[in-house]
Image (spheres, grey):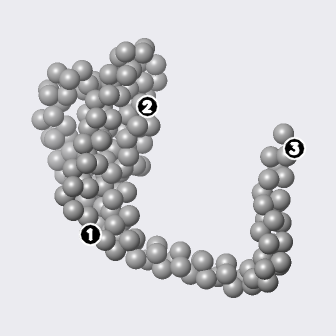
Amino acid sequence: MQLFGLAAPLLIAAVLATAAVKRVDVLEEFGRGAMDGLKTAVELLPTLMLVVTVIGFAYRSGALSQLAECVTPVMQKLGFPPELVPLSLIRPVSGSGALAVFDNIISSCGADSFAGRAAAVLMGSTETTFYTVAVYFSATKLKADAGVFISSLTADVFGFIFSALVVKLYY
């Protein structure tokens, strides 16, 4: 147990010792790395602002609720709990928005309910697809083609459906 408390100081000491042996200016390298990180953050900022703005508009305009109402009957036929439809719509776009919806599901349905367990599996087995794609392609300066979005969203849909199926089979 004591060894884990020493892990960080030992790692720092090993890095400093290696830098001393190789005669590397640690302060200069740290500054260069920090500057590169700041440049990357500044380059990503417009993309992130766009994603957050679109999420805010969709949520506050009621478009997300209307879309959920349209999709719910189809999802229920697949055995998907209606409480999870808003979560499945917001999860590919916003991690923090999905956490808020997840918290609402746990509060209203309970953690041990079918919807609560399926929501937990859904949160663990899906990704904030649009956010991740936007950040990755913005950082690499590549263009995302339709195939990236189609394959990512297909994986998300299977994650949504199988989250309910797995919970139904095992609980």
- Answer whether residue 149 is visible to the viewer in this image: yes
* Circle on res. 26: none
Say which quarter of the image contains residue 89. top left
Mark 3 lies on a secondary structure that is helix
Q: Which amino acid does label 2 sit on?
A: Ala
At which x and y percent is residue 18?
A: 80, 72
x 67%, y 78%: residue = 30
Residue with the mark numbered 3: 2
Residue 53 drawn above or below residue 29: above
Q: Is residue 164 left or right of residue 24?
A: left
Labelled pair 1, 2 in contact (Cβ < 8 Å):
no
- Answer whether residue 115 is visible to the viewer in this image: no
Residue with the mark numbered 2: 120
Q: What residue type is labelled 3?
A: Gln
Residue 53 drawn above or below residue 26: above
Residue 10 drawn above or below residue 74: below
**Circle nearer the viewer, 3 or 1:** 1
Measure the alpha-carbon separation of dots 3 and 1: 49 Å
Say which quarter of the image contains residue 156. top left
Residue 127 drawn above or below residue 50: above
Going from N to C along the chain, the mark reached first, 2 or 3, is 3
Q: Is residue 61 left or right of residue 8?
A: left
At which x and y percent is residue 111?
A: 46, 24
Q: In which quarter of the image is the C terminus?
A: top left
x 83%, y 78%: residue = 21
Between 120 and 132, the one nearer to me in the picture: 132
x 43%, y 31%: residue = 120
Label 1 environment density (alpha carbons within 10 Å; few <14, some 14–19, many ≥20): few
Measure the alpha-carbon separation of dots 2 and 3: 34 Å
